[in-house]
Image (cartoon, rainbow, N blue to C red):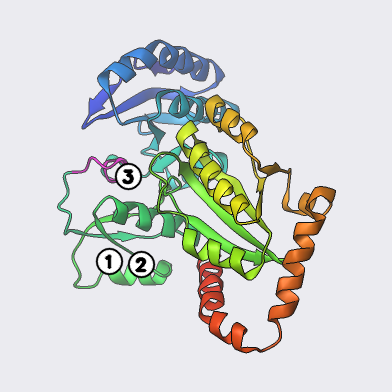
Amino acid sequence: MAKVVMKPTIENEIAVYRLDGNLDASIANNFIEVMQQHRSILRSLRVKAVLFSFKQIASVDASALLQIVEWLDRIQRQLRISTGFCDYSPKQYKALRHLTQKRAVFLYKNFKIAELGVGVSRMRKSALILVYDEDRENKTDMVSDLISKGYSAISAMNRSDFEKRLHSKSAYEQQVISSAFGGMTKSVGVSYHRHLFIYTFRGAVDENSNGTFKRQAHLERVKWGYRLFVFDLSGVQILNARGAYYLYELAKESREAGAAIALIGVDESRFEPAALRVLEKSSFYVLDSLEAIFGELKLESALRSNHQVFEAQTELSRELIVQLPVFMAAAQEALLAL
């Protein structure tokens, strides 16, 4: 039977739990009990991440793994630190990507990559890091996250380009592959669908979110006459009270300019209770999906205004020509978000 290491190894501000043997339901339950006991200890040690290592695990039961994923997701919200897995095989990576894609649980192929992702690596900031993943969005997220931490990171276009670069004269200090840790990058995408501008928030929305939303571009759209916009929160992994207040301020400014904001993708399990209270007191229209907006009677007038603006601007006019650079910028943002 596998044995849970009761005391995690603390390495460079990262706590690593290692099991030796098979991972089954009983061991998963045992690990969760240990983690419950260690919460206050981990908080007092001020570690920046808690990782579960696969290095010495012989076999894995799928249901047991899901238990651990769900627990790590819960722990990161309770302790407000990064959680994730490391030292897994390529096959295990595919399974972990499926289980963690909509959770704030990160994947690090090895400990060196974990140090980079957590932001505690002693690697020279000027050192070049090569990033590759088959999932283009994940690859872009990781590069953005590394750059935001001050590292020099570039991505390979595809597998062939990745292998070619590895054998080129360029000296890459580290290769980041089979990992996923950029989901907390604070970025807001924009797209346009059925006369609606949709702002897609991702990662963490918190006290550090100022500057991620292109406020001036949004207010320009309000000036054109658009009266309804969408905040899509389905990609948000953490929303705290300050983050909710940040959204509230954006909505208040829009309302004062005559526009309404509809929220979709609200997941109460991922948002702090205080954040939910802020959202409840705000003037958002909270709906289950984008399609639900088009059936909401209270939003009919605003939708009509959006449609009228669109129809008026489809005719080439002096005003439209003046606005074309702004429309092009919005289109470019939408393309980059794909």
- Which mark is on residue 114? none
Mark 1 / mark 3, whichever is N-terminal: 3
Mark 2 vs mark 3: in front: 3
Identity, as a three-letter code, of the amino acid under mark 2:
Phe
Q: Are marks 2 and 3 in contact (CB under 8 Å)?
A: no
Query: Where residue 68 sits: x, y (%)?
Result: 50, 26
Snapshot quadrant of residue 304 = bottom right
Q: What residue type is labelled 3?
A: Gly
Under tag 1, what secondary structure? helix
Mark 1 or 3, closer to the camera: 3
Q: Distance between the residues labelled 1 and 3?
A: 21 Å
Asked if the stretch drawn in magenta spans residue 154, the answer is no
- Find disc 1 in the rendering and name its residue: 166
| Quadrant of image for the C terminus | bottom right
Give residue 219's position: percent from left, percent from top: 54, 62
What residue sits right under mark 3 in the picture? Answer: 117
Question: Does 5 sit left or right of 204 as displayed?
Answer: left
Q: Give the range drawn in magenta.
A: 113-121
**What is the secondary structure assignment of the residue under circle 3?**
helix
Q: Circle 2 is placed at which residue position?
A: 162
What residue appears at the point 37 percent right and 67 percent down from the top-left corner?
156
Amino acid at the residue labelled 1: Leu
Callout 2–callout 1 Cβ contact below 8 Å? yes
